[in-house]
Image (spheres, grey):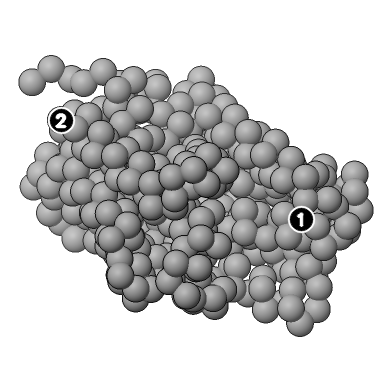
Amino acid sequence: MPSPDPRRVTAVSLATMVAAIAPLHLFGALAPDIQEEFGFGDAEQGYAIAAFFAVSALLSSWGGALSDRWGPSKALRSGTALALAGAVGVVFAPSYGVVVIALCVAAIGNAINQPSNNTFISGGVPLHRRGLAMGIKQSAIPTSTGLAGLALPTIAVSLGWEAAYVGAALLAGAAILAIPHVDPPVAAPATRTRYRPSPLMLRVAIGAGFGAMAIANIGTFLVRSLTDAGFSRTLAGTVQVVGSVALITSRVGWGALMDRHSDWNRFAFAAGLLVLGTAAFPMIATGHDVVAVVGALLAYGFGWSWPGVVHLATVEHNPDATGAASGVLQASMFVGAMTGPALFGVVADAHSFGWAWMMVCGFSAVAAAMMSAAALRAEPG
């Protein structure tokens, strides 16, 4: 069977990633309408989002190992089908409880698709273009967030919030049909061996978990923090939009840079990005107009742009178990994404947004330290 076009593999990877996370992002963007429909409040909104991330975290290791056993194409079709089912389930849900169940179904698909896409790219994209493909794949999160934000003033206002979920289901269906056959990067017998993370990967996973605890707060609390500091909603929203563009550009750009410098230590590069992100959070904490804006853009462009580089390095250091290793990495990141905002909210309520951003600075510093330790261990010899 001829090899698929790497451009098609990259585009399908992005589509399946967006399809997997879109049910959650739509749930956040369309919250006022959905809450009014089912009669639940902000606390229940938080419980549902936490449930999505909890299921994703618990099953990511399994989802990654599944892609090693089944092959990436079959795993992605299954994961995207679950995302489709979750989106449809939300549309036809009769109650809040069923909405949560539908989101958890989509979360199972997310737990499969996130690590399986690393195996998919490893098997379908040549080595010299893999960094760019990883960067494009990792731009799925800001892409999904942006599409969810656009759904509110466009589709939801004119056709109802259900129409936005129908659109997500159609995207998932189109992605399923477009998935080409990609052979796993290693033979099947090797993938059946139980994966045990190496000391290097344990450092990477811990660092990525703390990094996720930091960056999850950018999308969740930045706008609210800026408005609390006196920014207008328009200006705060503009900062978020510009930051999202910077995030997509940097993730793709770092991936292309990795392709041109195959001898660079990926973990060291990621650690450098985390250091710059660490410096950005105290700037946000000041609440000062110019300083906070510069800090926000640094956080987007550097502090949030490292995951693609780390995923690339994980694949390169685990060629015989790309899915399983990616699953361990992604599980740690999901745990961080679930716990970071919860802790931020507690500190912000008890003290201030400034103190909460300083806590985030600490998370990012730990992540940078762990990634630096991984970089030292990854050096030859």
Q: Secondary structure at mark 1?
A: helix
Can residue 367 be seen?
Answer: no
Discs 1, 2 touching: Cβ within 8 Å: no
Circle number at residue 138? none
Query: What amino acid is labelled 1 in the image?
Result: Phe
Given the current orientation, which residue lies at the most extreme front position? 158
The answer to which of 104 and 148 lies nearer the viewer is 148
Can residue 225 be seen?
Answer: yes
Left or right, 160 with respect to 116, comes to right
Instruction: State which quadrant residue 285 falls in.
Output: bottom right
Q: Position of residue 204 (x, y in %)?
A: 48, 55
Left or right, 157 with respect to 287, comes to left
Q: Position of residue 162 (x, y in %)?
A: 38, 52
Circle number at residue 281? 1
Residue 259 vertical position relative to residue 176 in the rendered view, above or below: above
Q: Residue at x 26, y 49 (%)?
A: 84
The answer to which of 374 and 107 lies nearer the viewer is 107
Left or right, 153 with respect to 131, comes to right
Instruction: State which quadrant residue 220 falls in.
Output: bottom right
Q: Secondary structure at mark 2?
A: loop
Q: Which residue is mark 2?
A: 181
Left or right, 144 with respect to 232, comes to left
Q: CA distance from mark 1 to mark 2?
A: 43 Å
Q: Position of residue 354 (x, y in %)?
A: 82, 66
Residue 27 vertical position relative to residue 349 in the rendered view, above or below: above
Given the current orientation, which residue lies at the most extreme bottom position? 350
Residue 46 vertical position relative to residue 105 in the rendered view, above or below: below
Q: Residues within 10 Å of mark 2 (few under 14, many from 20)?
A: some
Query: What amino acid is labelled 2 in the image?
Result: His
Q: Residues within 10 Å of mark 1 (few under 14, many from 20)?
A: many
- Quadrant including the N terminus: top left
Q: Sequence-wise, which precedes: disc 1 or disc 2?
A: 2
